[in-house]
Amino acid sequence: MIRKLLPYTKGYRLWILGGILCSASESVLELMLPKAMSDIVDVGIANGDRAFILITGIKMVLMALLALAGGVGAALFAAKAGMGFGAQLRQAEYEQVQRFSFSNIEHFSTASLITRLTSDVASMQMTLMMSMRIFVRAPVMLLTALVMALTISLSLSQVFLVSIPLLMMAVALVITRVGPFFTALQKSTDDVNLVVQEDLNAIRVVKSFVREEEEKEKFARRNEHLRDTAMRAFGFVVTFMPIITLIMGSTMVAIMWIGGHYVYGGTMLSGDLIAFFTYAGEILVSLMMVSMVLMILTRSIACGKRIVEVLDEKPEITDVQADSALKVGDGSITFDHVYFKYHPTAEGWNLTDVSLQIRSGMTVGIIGGTGSAKTTLVSLIPRLYEVNDGAVYVGGHNVKDYTMETLREACAMVLQKNTLFSGTVAENLRWGRADATDEELREACRIACADEFISAMPDGYDSRIEQGGTNVSGGQKQRLCIARAILRNPKILILDDSTSAVDTATDARIREGLRHALPGATKLIIAQRIASVMDADLIVVMDDGKISGAGTHDELMESNHIYREVYESQQEGVGIDG
């Protein structure tokens, strides 16, 4: 794990080194003060040497100032290195997620990825900051204080032969017990975030079904589980503190008792006992700091493993065999005996032996029942998923021959469940093409029949769109997304039931506008209404992952019973409505 995360300290290693040096120098200087104080008591005061007391006092002031400077420097360097490391690690993790295919993303829940990008990274950067301060300071103080204590009294130092092993045993016991709880703690955090995310994204559904109380109970259960896990994890830490205090207190009492007898018997100076007592306190405090850092490291290890899981996830769709110079020449599409399933271990295929040829510039309608794999079929064109067997060709080349950026720039896809981002209407439209002019925005919206409601908005194209497009209707959202796709001027335009929320008249106007605006583009229209595709050059009927039939409206009415049944049922519905 350390090997995986170490590269993200690049650019901040000098800051880390500087922080370590500052922490070490601060510790050494602080530990020189008790010895100087001992000299003042045993030499200066005992001999009445004011000059010695003054000079030693000045030295102590200088050492204290230098130690202060070292402490400030250590804190500054630690903050700089920790925040920089966290930012680079977070950036790398986010960029890795952007490289994921849909199947990769399905390995992690969205809530878990958010936790790994936020609290897990924050834990790692805090660990680095604390390690630079405490994990350097504590060992230096421990070793230096131990050496100084041994030079003062070897016999009195034998007290540490009991206290130090006891402290180490207590630390080892807690760390071995608390590790699994920290792993469970991060998983519980994922579960809480998942509930919050789902409820906020679907708040309208929650309220429309009056499910507030049930969702409160679901959140309460997961929140209580998080609380219980946290209490068990940190309960060990809380239990550990009284044990530390007991060992430290007992050690101090033993030093006072034994050392007092040494001073009384004349085998030890009182100043040396004061210094030894101070060094003993530093030794025990250092051990406590090391133990606390080790427990923090235990949690960080759990967080680090979760981060490395994301960084080590191999994107299933890559540009390994792609030719970066190859461009999409036209919008022709060929499915050559394509087989596909979402999960490699699944028994059945989602697409079975699909073969289809579509000439560039054609308008192709795709219909079929729910679960017939219509969306799956078109998702293979821009390589949102990878075929298991067979091949998909675009512009006469296998889609794997293009870089994903080149292929997807030639395709524009409008989904039934459309997404808008927080920002203005114009900013959302320019996702299609960043350099689009205002006139091009208006023209795209006119074709998509979005201009009529944009002109009624308070600030027109500068009107604010809330996160997820919650302040526009479903039909308005669909038309904005169609306009965004038009601005791309794609070779292939995929409309996945993207006019389901608009009326039939508007649907017809949009299709007519697309015919004139993108005459050379291949248009694939997934629809539930046959009226939306009956004038297409080719209509494909999907059934259970297979092509049941393909042809014009008249040909399918003659040859395909599924198409005929759907058409007749919709005509009956129109008659009833009329």
Image (tube, rainbow, N blue to C red):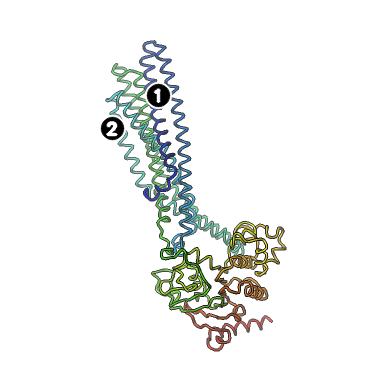
- Label 2 neighbourhood size at 10 Å, few (<14), some (14-19), many (20+)? few
Determine the CA span between mark 2 and mark 1: 25 Å
Q: Circle 2 sits in a helix, a strand or a loop, which is it?
A: helix
Asked if residue 562 is positioned above or below residue 122 in the image, the reply reads: below
Q: Whole-percent x and y of residue 382?
A: 50, 68
The amino acid sitting under disc 2 is: Leu
Q: Total marks drawn?
A: 2
Q: Residue furthest bottom?
A: 558
- Label 1 neighbourhood size at 10 Å, few (<14), some (14-19), many (20+)? many
Residue at 41 percent across and 15 percent down: it is: 53
Residue that badge 1 annotates: 33
Q: Whole-percent x and y of residue 88?
A: 46, 48
Q: Whole-percent x and y of residue 355?
A: 46, 79
Q: Which mark is residue 297?
A: none
Q: Residue furthest front?
A: 325
Q: Circle 1 sits in a helix, a strand or a loop, which is it?
A: helix
Q: Nearer the viewer, residue 310 or 575?
A: 310
Q: Residue furthest top?
A: 48
Residue at 35 percent across and 18 percent down: it is: 270
Q: Nearer the viewer, mark 2 or mark 1?
A: 1
The amino acid sitting under disc 1 is: Leu
Residue that badge 2 annotates: 161
